[in-house]
Amino acid sequence: MSKELLLGIDIGTSACKVAVFDVSGKVLAQANRPYKVYYPHSGWAEQDPDEWWDAICLGIKDVLSEDNISADDIAGIGVDGQSWSAIPVDKDGKVLDRTPIWMDTRARDICDRVKEKVGEDRIFDIAGNDFLPSYTTPKMIWFKEEKPEVFKKTDKFLQSNSYIVYRLTGEMSQDMSQGYGVHFFDMKKLNYDETLAEELGLDINLLPSIYNCDQVVGAITPAAASATGLRVGTPVVAGGLDAACGTLGAGVYKVGQTQEQGGQAGGMSICTDHALAHKKLILSPHVVPGKWLLQGGTVGGGGTLKWFKQEFGKDISFDDLTAEAEKVAPGSNGVVFLPYMSGERSPIWDPDAKGVFYGLSFDKTRGHMIRALLEGVAYSLKHNLVTAEETGAEIGVLNAMGGSANSLLWTQIKADITGRTIQVPTSDTATTLGAAILAGIGCGLYKDYDQAISQTVVITRVQEPDMKNRQVYEEGFKLYLELYKNLKGTFKEYK
């Protein structure tokens, strides 16, 4: 088994995942290690990148302790990570402060001011994305204005995966797919726009050089080898955005293919061959060169059911909870759930939005609430797909990924509500597999993406929409949209 293994590292919101794959995409070993999210003020959500590193070191040691895994057999390493970090590091690579993460909305006032000063359309024309507080750029400006002592010492702002790549190799990088978080990254030309950076009051030198996601950035240093157990000299590629790596690991790399995200958060990613932007959605380069992803990212995903279980069903398994939901008719007898549990991202972009159960009465059960929760997340998926259709995007079969894809009921509800066929590859490892595929391309284990996907991605089941449920779900979706429309002002007034 000489040098034919690949290591994928995923920096999630609640934990890191580390997995070792063979060239066929089979998982030989995997480990999870948790870390904290800090909420010091309303609207703030922070993490400590050094806690990511500590967890990843432990996770790598976990997988290398398996009898069938040797560090000498790992041919390459890929790292993916959560979006929209803004990690300030000095010239020695030392982290100067916690990073605001994708849920953080502290820069809301900055966004309003910048859009008025620079011009909303001016920014969108270059970036292909609206200027919103979740993104990296407003966070960089926040550091400049609110923590000038940190900003003054900052040599570079790094993304989640680029920071871990730095810790592994000693090389600073900005991968192509995470460029979308920076509004002076030109989405069509795929480089930094110095003029727009200056208009935003920033310097392009605050970011590292741009690398293709499958490009080797460097190799494992002696210090990293000592901390992880990896072999000195093992190549590490730039890696990319977790959603994009998950999209690749789910087999989506050609125009018209679409990924459906069912992790902690939800959403979708549509593969295109050009920068197809929509102000209410998210546009990023794919980790696959020459492709882009038109994405919808929602707060409500598998995390909504996790929350419900924690608060209302601690002693019940997820399977038992969904079994209760299965006894309830489609449409949940009029109970509707708005899955806006930490504000909402696309397509409404409302940090004040709240989670809501509507339609409760004495005849409703916990099963009604669970099914409404599953349907509410599916409505949020449909909302993004309907919005994407406004661009003329080609949307085909949905390839599902994430823990939610393991639920036959939830997947069927999504198929019924969207009216689309859903394919389920090996879902739990799609994101780390995508990172590993990038490493396999970079170190030459795969000659191209066609070979990599054909060897590694296996469809485990296909679920077709049940069209007899279409009418009840069309009515449910109308009510879902109407509820937000009517409550939007209330959300804003009563924070």
Image: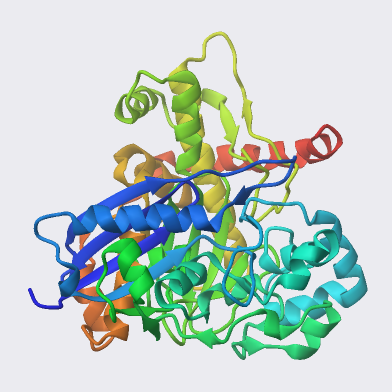
Near-viewer residue (179 or 72): 72
Say which quarter of the image contains residue 235: bottom left
Near-viewer residue (332 or 1): 1
Q: Is residue 143 left or right of residue 34?
A: right
Q: How is the image coloured?
A: rainbow
Is 304 located above or below residue 214 in the figure? above
Q: Quadrant of the N terminus?
A: bottom left
Say which quarter of the image contains residue 313: top left
- Residue 303, given in percent of the width and then of the height, sits at 48, 40
The answer to whether residue 399 is visible is yes
- Residue 453, given in percent of the width and then of the height, sits at 25, 74
Q: Residue at x 63, y 82 (%)?
A: 187
Q: Is residue 181 left or right of residue 198?
A: left
Q: Residue at x 20, y 59 (%)?
A: 64
Q: Is residue 487 left or right of residue 58?
A: right
Q: Residue at x 39, y 83 (%)?
A: 218
Q: Quadrant of the C terminus?
A: top right
Near-viewer residue (341 or 365): 341
Is 48 located above or below residue 86 in the figure? above
Q: Is residue 350 left or right of residue 386?
A: right
- Residue 322, given in percent of the width and then of the height, sits at 36, 29
Outermost residue, top side: 362
Outermost residue, right side: 117
Near-viewer residue (458 or 20): 20
